[in-house]
Image (tube, rainbow, N blue to C red):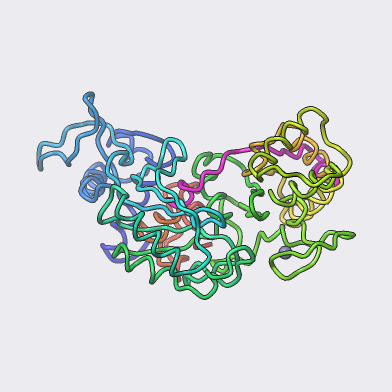
Amino acid sequence: MSGSPARLRRLHERWVFDRLRRGGSASRAELAKETGLSAPTVGKVVDALLGSGLVEEISPGGPSPDPGPAGGRPARPLRLNTTRLSLVTLQLGVRHTRLAALPIAGPEDEHWPLQFRTAGTRGGWLNHLRQAATRLNIHSPRVVMISTPGVVDERAGRVLLSPNLHWTERADLVADVSAIWSCPVGLVQEIRALALGHLEAEPRLEDFLLVDIGEGVGGAAVVDGKLYGGPLAISGEIGHTPVAGNDRLCGCGGVGCLETLISRSGLLEGWQGSQGASSRLSPAKAWTTMARAFQDKGVEPWLDERLHAAGSVIAGALNLLGLRKVVVTGAATELPACFVQRLAEWVERSAMWARFGQVHCQVAPRRRAMGLISAAIDRFVLPPQSWDARDDESTGPSTDVARREGNLAG
Ligand SMILES: [Zn+2]
């Protein structure tokens, strides 16, 4: 290990922080033992992390608001800060924009206290965002992280293609949002944010492909404990894989994309078509009626055909990357179990892994806020290495920490 004292200190802070992040609360002695750092070094690192509000001490009467007095350090266990609001997470969705102020430890449950309808223009959206910002209970966040759909150049902070939200392609979201909160602002492609959030919630999970069904259909792979793909996230675009025999036009400009079959609106269109008559129900009402019909009738032929197509596309991604675990988020959590069960059967039929062992499909909640916090930590709060050069400090106290350091920069 080589490097300047400042770089070493930063690295040690990251090790201690990651130990608390992955392993929960710990005493200073436990931190020294588990990171391999000396007790005095851990003491200094913990003081720095307490001072910057990233960790807190747990006392019987609750967390102490400030670091202990110099010299008289109490031997209390430590954990990530659960009380001081330090980040703004912002979900720029096709229909709604949601925001929350959060501590570095993240939310216990995903909850977005403020939301507004996403406007169709940059100016309209910014007006709503400025108003919402005044109602958010944080004034000087350390970082603002934005999740956004489409093909996103995360390093440049630009949206390159957004089939369902075209105005973001011309907007400089980072500059616009920095003008509201004067702090660093980062963009994360929304499905990548979900995969990072899932990884954060289940750090011991094996590699997986996350498939999200929402207004669009997207994927993100975690391979070798890291998000697959470079900062230019033109990966995981499984929703835009054409399906033979499907001639529906897609927002991306293509024809026959999987997304037109199994996105929320695609499923609704399919169900309403199978009913024969045009429905006068609102989309929300139609959705719950459709879910009830799935419950009563199981997977009908029109749906089975679509799940077959989805299963083949997903299996193609698994076969390419050598994965055997699929995590389905989004609309699937609102549908009866038969939906994902049938999808899993089709995946299993085409996935090579099924010949040797089991392929697992599980439904999981969206953990977008945690994913945004994970990205904020890696890019701005305690970057393991610089965004560009990250191979010179790859040695760590454990392979787990070391391999996880490449998240998002990977
Ligand atoms: Zn498409």
Answer left or right for 302 relative to 33: right
Where residue 94 sits, quadrant-wise, is bottom right
Identity of the residue furthest to the front in this view = 280
Identity of the residue furthest to the top in this view = 60
**Does the segment drawn in magenta span residue 216?**
no
At horizontal 72% and vertical 71% (from top left) the residue drawn is 253
In the image, is residue 119 above or below residue 114?
A: below
Give the x, y percent position of residue 91: 48, 54
Where residue 353 sits, quadrant-wise, is top right
Q: Which of 242 and 132 lies nearest the eye of the viewer?
A: 132
Number of callouts in the render? Answer: 0
In the image, is residue 391 above or below residue 15?
A: below
Give the x, y percent position of residue 182: 29, 65
Give, as a single range, the part of the protein colored magenta: 347-373
In the image, is residue 399 above or below residue 172?
A: above
At horizontal 64% and vertical 66% (from top left) the residue drawn is 163
Ligand 1 quadrant assignment: bottom right
Answer left or right for 392 relative to 38: right
Q: Quadrant of the N terminus?
A: bottom left
Give the x, y percent position of residue 4: 29, 66
Answer left or right for 195 relative to 9: right
Q: Which of 218 and 81 lies nearest the eye of the viewer?
A: 218
Q: Can residue 351 be seen in this view?
A: no
**Does the segment drawn in magenta span residue 371?**
yes
At horizontal 25% and vertical 47% (from top left) the residue drawn is 53
Q: Is residue 322 visible?
A: yes
